[in-house]
Structures are given as C-alpha cells and as structure tokens.
Amino acid sequence: MRQFSIERSLHILGPVLGKKRGVEVRIGGGQACTDGNTIWLPALPIEDAEAAALGFGLLFHETNHVRYTDFAVTKGEGLVGALTNALEDIRIDGLGHQEYLGGRREEEQLVEALIRRGEAKSCTKDDHPARILESYVMWRLEYDVLGIEAAQSMAEDAEIIFRQTFAPGVQTKLDALMFGVRNCRSTLDVQGLARNIAQMLDDEARAEQEPSPEKQGGQGEQPGKGTSPLQQAIDATAEAHVSGIGELAQAAINAKGREAPALNLPMPCGASSSVALELAEGASFSAEV
C-alpha cells in the first residue's frame, strides 16, 4: 500500500488521533457531526488529498472544541450567538495551534479546500448586512490572529465590502474590540466579548438613527429599507448569519461523501494500529502527505 494511503487515511488515524486528544472518533455513516464527546465522519475516499484535508481539518477543529470549549456556556441568540461562535472558533483553534505543531497546517489546508470548493465564499455588497459584518470578523481574525494565509483574500474582500456597507467609525470600534479575543481565556470570556461587541454595535445603530442634516435622505441605507445596514445586522434572523469553519467543513465533507463512493480500509489488529499510533505520537497533529 502506498505511503499516502497509510499516513493520511482517516480510517486509521482519525480514531487514534481522536483518542489521543480525549475524543471518540467514529468513521462511517452519511454525515459529519458531533455531540461534544464523539465526532462522526462519513467514510471518504482514501487516496484523495481533498478528502484528507477536509477530514483532518474538521477533526482538528472539533477536537479543539471538545478540549477547550465550555459547553455549559450558552452562546446566546442572534448576533451575540453568531459572534460568540466566530470568536470561540478563533480562541480554540489558536490553542490547538499551540498544542499541536501540525494543527496550523491542517487548518490551512482545510481553508484552502473550502475556498476552492466554494463552501467558503467572499461576501458581496448585495449580501445581508449580518453576513457582511460576520464575514469580516471571521476572516480578519482567521488571517490576522491565527495566521491562516489562505484566508487573506477572504479577509481583504470582506473588509472592502464592510467599509462600503457600514459607517467608518464602526470598523474602528469593532477592530478595537474583536482583537481582544487574543486575551480571552475561556468560553465565558468569549461570550462576554461578544456581548460587548453587540452592545457597541447597538449603540452605533442608535446614534445613526438620531436625526442630523448629514443623514437626511437616508445616507447609508439600502434601497427600500427603513433601517440602517447596522440595525439590519443586529435584527437579523437565523438564516442571515454566517456559518463557522466547523459548519462549512461539515457541509463540504458531507458533499464530498456524495461525490464518490467511499473505500473502506480494514483495520487489522496489531501492525496497522501500531503504525498509526507511532504516527500519532509525532510532533505534528497528522502525518505528512
């Protein structure tokens, strides 16, 4: 069997790496999902670099949640919930990068695959303001805080659309708050930061509604809308919010599983499990391709 099949096979390394990080990983079934203790991944083609990037990337991300996220903390509703989700993704993946040297590579390859496949898309000026705001937060932090090079173009595109959509002062105040995720030490800290950001945005939206000569004529409002883009972002319904990295990866893996028939690699006792364990004990989160 070629080295690629052994070293990058989720069928072998997935459960071993999950166990090493205190998470049960099960391969098989029709969809990728997790309940906070167990991660299910569908059986994917073995000799497929994209399937490996998606699978190991999702495994890295979800095990970070299990290790570092306090699931007793409710993320909240609406914009607060969306911001909590985005900020917590940054916090836990940053911790994962520190713990596993190969983690950054896994996330880099995951983001590259998500962009190439189209699950991760740049926002446009016609998108809902909530999507524009949250895309800016997500991709700027992926690039500037986590150092994911593949996220650079997404961050730059999101920033351009953000500036075209919201008042200039909003970006300055948002940046001053959201980069505070670097100092968050817990999920509760993240939730508090998300609430602070939401409160700042609400204050800005209220200030925009105050009548002034400069704002006569509905400056900054979308055609046909009675409220500002910022207020629309605050009031957005669930379907307007952005999916996080984990949700995007799950969607990609589920689609990948439908694109080609999966090959099942038997896991013989003894030799293969020993090989997998040796690979998992290395400095990197997963073996080199």
Image: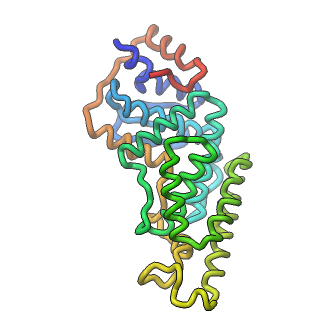
Question: Residue at 51% across / 62% down in the picture?
Answer: 160
Task: Tell me if 262 is positioned left or right of 107 in this view.
Answer: left
Colouring used for the render: rainbow
Residue 87, placed above or below residue 129: above
Q: Where is residue 95 in the image (x, y as percent from the top left)?
A: 65, 38
Task: Tell me if 134 is positioned left or right of 73 in this view.
Answer: left
Which image quarter is the C terminus in? top left
Residue 276, placed above or below residue 239: above
Determine if residue 223 is in view: yes
Task: Tell me if 156 is positioned left or right of 40 in this view.
Answer: right
Q: Nearer the viewer, residue 78 or 268?
A: 78
Q: Which of 51 and 108 is in front in this view?
A: 108
Residue 221, placed above or below residue 70: below
Q: Where is residue 52 in the image (x, y as percent from the top left)?
A: 41, 30
Question: Residue at 53% across / 29% down in the picture?
Answer: 18
Which image quarter is the N terminus in? top left
Q: Where is residue 22 in the image (x, y as percent from the top left)?
A: 59, 30
Determine if residue 39 is in view: no
Image quadrant of residue 117?
Answer: top left
Question: Residue at 34% across / 31% down in the picture?
Answer: 44
Q: Where is residue 153 in the image (x, y as percent from the top left)?
A: 48, 49
Residue 113, placed above or below residue 158: above
Question: Residue at 34% across / 20% down in the picture?
Answer: 265
Image quadrant of residue 11?
Answer: top left
